[in-house]
Amino acid sequence: MSSDEKKAFKCPECGGKGVPTGKTWANTSPMVLMGGKIIIMGIVQCEECENKFRRKLKEIPLESEEAKEYKKDKEE
């Protein structure tokens, strides 16, 4: 887990601390042809009320080395 994934998020139900559960998926921004980004989304669970919600965990520019590695890993 990278430092971005360990970031705490505010729960929309109780305002408590939410942490990523590990379930993630990638979305591509609609402006792909104009230098878009890969957006990593994930499920976050509140430590207090156990509520689960979705949040953006990370944005990666399409031309970066990290994005190329991510795409290569997903193709395998």
Image (spheres, rainbow, N blue to C red):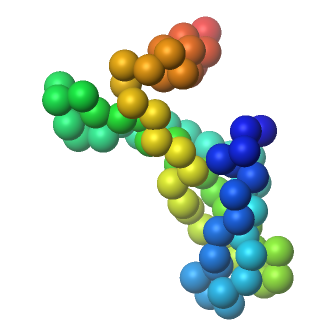
Depicted 8 relative to depicted 51: above or below: above
Judged from this view, the residue extending furthest toward the right is: 47
Query: Within the image, what quadrant is residue 12 found in?
Result: bottom right
- 33 displayed left or right of 74: left
Depicted 53 relative to depicted 21: above or below: below
Q: x%, y% of residue 58?
A: 53, 45
Residue at horizontal 68%, vertical 90%?
14
Residue at horizontal 28%, vertical 33%?
36
Residue 63 can be seen in this image: yes
Identify which residue, 36 or 53, lies in the foreground: 36
Query: Within the image, what quadrant is residue 17 found in?
Result: bottom right
Residue 71 can be seen in this image: no
Residue at horizontal 72%, vertical 45%?
3
Q: x%, y% of residue 65?
A: 50, 16
Residue at horizontal 78%, vertical 84%?
49
Q: x%, y% of residue 4?
A: 65, 47
Q: Quadrant of the C terminus?
A: top right
Judged from this view, the residue extending furthest toward the left is: 34
- 16 displayed left or right of 34: right
Q: Quadrant of the N terminus?
A: top right
Count of marks placed on residues: 0
Query: Within the image, what quadrant is residue 52 found in?
Result: bottom right
